[in-house]
Image (cartoon, rainbow, N blue to C red):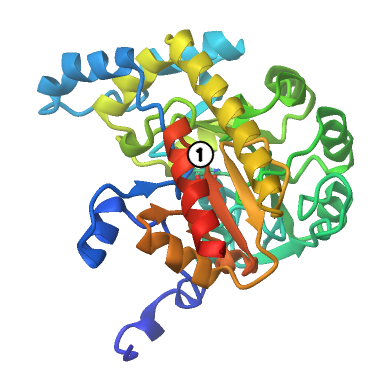
Amino acid sequence: MSDLFEHLAAPGVQQLQPYLPGKPVEELERELGITDSIKLASNENPLGASARALRAIEDCYKNINYYPDGSAFKLSSHLARRFDVDPACLTFGNGSNDVLELIARAFLTPGHSAVYSEYAFAVYPIVVQATGAKARIAPAFDEAHPAMPMGHDPDALVDSIGDDTRVVFIANPNNPTGTWIEPATLAAMFDRIPDHVIVVLDLAYLEYMDEHLRPDIKRLLNTYPNLIVTCTFSKVYALAGLRIGYGISHPEIADLLNRVRQPFNTNLIAQAAALAALDDDEHLEQSIKMNNEGKAWLEQELAGLGLAYLPSMGNFITIDLRRDAAPVYEALLKQGVIVRPVANYRMPKHLRVTIGTGEQNSRFIEALSAVLA
Ligand SMILES: Cc1ncc(COP(=O)(O)O)c(C=O)c1O
């Protein structure tokens, strides 16, 4: 590309590598002239949205000539009751990615640094770099770690904090590794983080975790006022296309985040659908059940194929092919199966697959067996 304008951009933006989304089904079908392909590339909920959310959308879409409620009052009240916090603790985002960006914008400057783990979710480097702040990347556990290969190393995260550090990002579980941190280890880590460092605990896959591994959000927030928990409606609540997520924090932190937030960053339909989805316990349980069953089945099949994979508490499994994963990814595309290569995470031998419906999982395993044969 020419350099007509690049030199004009902020230094952090000049070096920025854009986020690589999963390949859309339509794009693959257009490129290869095939139909009936499946996408297991973006950790979406294969069950589809809750019927209640869909009804809520039907009930409200005719009002889209009006701006949404900028404070998301109804959703905010509902979530505040659910988490037993004051509504002033909540910050809404156009997806939780938006909240991650608000955090970076509110707390980071070129004179500061942020800490995150090697192999951590790709949005952290992007939002940090865009502010011009320095990234301090904590080494992850190595591939041979007996319990959490390539997972966040809590000691390394704390040890990477410097005098200039303002924010630490922790994904629990992390994407793309699927690895997690046990609640007691998490608390022990937070005990070691100075009060003036903002700790972001990204719980995008919270509901998929085994219950005993889910952090006690209310207790953590009460104990660590420097904590921001981020959650999303994109995963188990199956509303990825509507873009809505939120942060929970000390009200003073929420106030700072809300200062840099666009007034109408979550739309009217997303707010209504999210509110309805929260009340659909059946959809939630079904989604978790489908994921657990799919995960057990896929793990068994992968082991049957002699393939290693990282332990996961998310709705995806990251397979260690122990060879260049790019040709396998390309060959799967030709079979109409879209998964996610993760070479951009410096994991060129891994492929991440979203846990789909039983039918999609079978189709993936069949295609993978054929490709590897
Ligand atoms: C760890 C993690 N955090 C946050 C997100 C952002 O999700 P959203 O912006 O859709 O809420 C994702 C999405 O894949 C994720 O994997």
Q: Judge whether residue 80 can be spotted in this image.
A: yes
Q: Judge whether residue 357 can be spotted in this image.
A: no
State the residue position of label 1. Answer: 257
Query: Image quadrant for the N terminus?
Result: bottom left
Query: Image quadrant for the C terminus?
Result: bottom right
Q: Amino acid at mark 1?
A: Leu
Q: What residue appears at the point 89 percent right and 35 percent down from the top-left corner? A: 188
Q: What residue appears at the point 77 percent right and 20 percent down from the top-left corner? A: 212
Where in the figure is residue 273, as x and y percent of width and height? Answer: 32, 21
Where in the figure is residue 339, as x and y percent of width and height? Answer: 47, 54
Where in the figure is residue 253, as x and y percent of width and height? Answer: 59, 34
Where in the figure is residue 85, as x and y percent of width and height? Answer: 60, 14
- Above or below residue 143? Residue 49 is above
Is label 1's Cβ within 8 Å of ligand 1? no
Rendered image quadrant of residue 61: top left
Q: What residue appears at the point 67 percent right and 65 percent down from the top-left corner? A: 135
> Which of 73 and 159 lies nearest the eye of the viewer?
159
Crowd around label 1: few <14 · some 14–19 · many ≥20 (10 Å): many
> Which of 163 and 283 lies nearest the eye of the viewer?
283
Q: What residue appears at the point 55 percent right and 10 percent down from the top-left corner? A: 82
Could you say whether the residue bearing mark 1 is in a helix, strand or loop?
Answer: helix
**In screen coordinates, is 326 left or right of 172?**
left
